[in-house]
Image: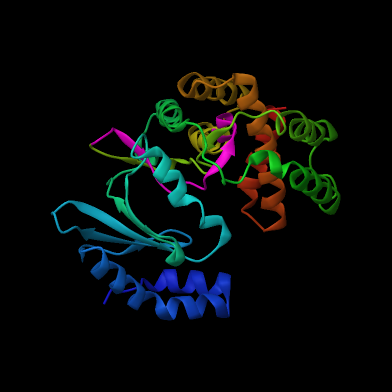
Amino acid sequence: MVGIPGNFIRLTADREGERGEVWLAGLPALADDLLARWGCVAEGRVTHGKVGLVVPVRRADGTPAVLKISFTHPGNVHEPDAFAVWQGRGAVELYARDDASFAMLLERAGPGTLADVTDAEEAVAIGGRVLRRLAVPAPPGLPRLAERAGEWAEELRKNDETLGRPLPRRVTDAALATVAELCGDQPDTLVHGDLHHGNVLRAEREPWLAIDPKGYAGDPAYEAFTLVRRSLLDVIGADDLRTPVLRRIDIFADAAGVDRERARRWAQLRTVRSAHWGRLHGEQAWLVELTERLAELLT
């Protein structure tokens, strides 16, 4: 029987409560059933993310793979849909899926992620090139980023007031303008939705492959935020942070083949939302401060 890491049990139970405990109780049997159904044998250490269990396996033909089972949450619904469209283009390949169980059998990639690349600008460029590979027409049925406009505008105004207007008015107004002006003007492109350094793995079939997509339809420039913010750790104490911030936006845009100004504006909007979230949820003070500083520099 597949063993479930204790930390994953605690994280899921704390976040999901009784519903999570019920799901966890049936998880070992579900994993064993899927292994048998898909002709796989578990091997190696079982790992996990925030919502998904990842079991290294060997398929019947000898190829390595991973069994991923995610908690039954609406945010995980469209992950296999994205993989099915990409068919291994810039992302790990989908071998099998069981949507009712939120389970997939996926190509195994790694070890190593984009976070291991010591040159921060090269890491941003790699992420941009992966994004370019992923930029294909979105299939019907995916949630549209354009549909989030009303929700985002309401959230920005509410959080700004609740938190006592922690950012200069021009910064919040710029984020609201982006919602109004860019959300309704988006291509119908498949968007990963969470393309950060940990979700880009080293691989052999292609140098780098993406994992863990949310599966949206919208503007690929939306992805600038996660790649650029993570890349700034090497210059966090610099007196002039604006220069590296804008340079990395440019590097991302060039590599991804997206408009630089749209990338900057999406990054600014998402940085403001992240700064609000950090204050509301007690994120570390240094990270909140960095995020707020970044929001101003991107305005």
Residue 208 percent across, percent down from the top left = 33, 35
Is residue 191 magenta-colored? no
Q: Is residue 7 left or right of residue 289?
A: left
Q: How is the image coloured?
A: rainbow
Residue 72 percent across, percent down from the top left = 51, 66
Identify which residue, 268 or 26, lies in the foreground.
26
Identify which residue, 167 or 187, lies in the foreground.
187
Q: Give the quarter of the image for residue 222.
A: top right
89 up-or-down from 61: above or below: above
Q: Residue at x 78, y 44 (%)?
A: 150
Q: Quadrant of the N terminus?
A: bottom left
Q: Residue most toward the front?
A: 140
258 up-or-down from 116: above or below: above
Count of all numbered marks drawn on residues in the image: 0
Q: Is residue 91 left or right of residue 175?
A: left
Q: Give the quarter of the image for residue 115.
A: top left
Residue 162 percent across, percent down from the top left = 84, 54
Q: Quadrant of the C terminus?
A: top right
The region drawn magenta spans 205-223
